[in-house]
Amino acid sequence: MVSSNVEEWSGIDDENYTVINEEHVVDAVANFMAKCILSNPKAQVFSCLI
């Protein structure tokens, strides 16, 4: 398994970049969507249907 924080040197612009995978992107989008929903006052009146 590869470390979750892997930096890779770029020979183009002499900068370091963090390499991420699809799972990191999905987690970030889900986190963003959850924060957006929870910040909406109308969403506070709904209860969980599970």
Image (cartoon, rainbow, N blue to C red):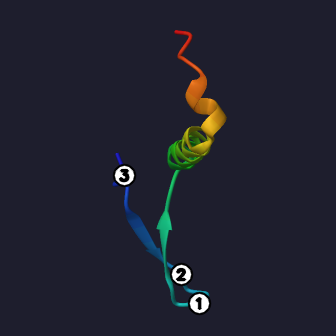
Q: Residue at x 34, y 54 (%)?
A: 3
Q: Which mark is residue 43?
A: none
Front one among 28 and 6: 28
Find disc 3 in the rendering and name its residue: 2
Label 2 to label 3: alpha-carbon separation: 19 Å
- The residue that disc 1 covers is 13
Q: Residue flagged by tag 1: what amino acid is it?
A: Asp
Q: Which residue is mark 2?
A: 10
For the residues bearing labels 2 and 1, Cβ distance under 8 angstroms: yes
Separation of marks 2 and 1 at Cα, in angstroms: 6 Å
Residue at image coords 53%, 49%: 28
Res 1 quadrant in image: top left
SS at circle 1: loop
Amino acid type at image mark 2: Ser
**Distance (Cα) linking label 3 and label 1:** 25 Å
Q: Mark 3 or mark 1: which comes first in sequence?
A: 3
Query: What is the x, y in percent for residue 36?
Result: 61, 45
Label 3 amino acid?
Val
Q: Would you call the spot at circle 2 few (<14 residues within 10 Å), some (14-19), or many (20 or more)?
A: few
Q: Residues within 10 Å of mark 1 (few under 14, many from 20)?
A: few
Q: Disc 3, disc 1: CB below 8 Å?
A: no
- Disc 2 is placed on an element classified as loop
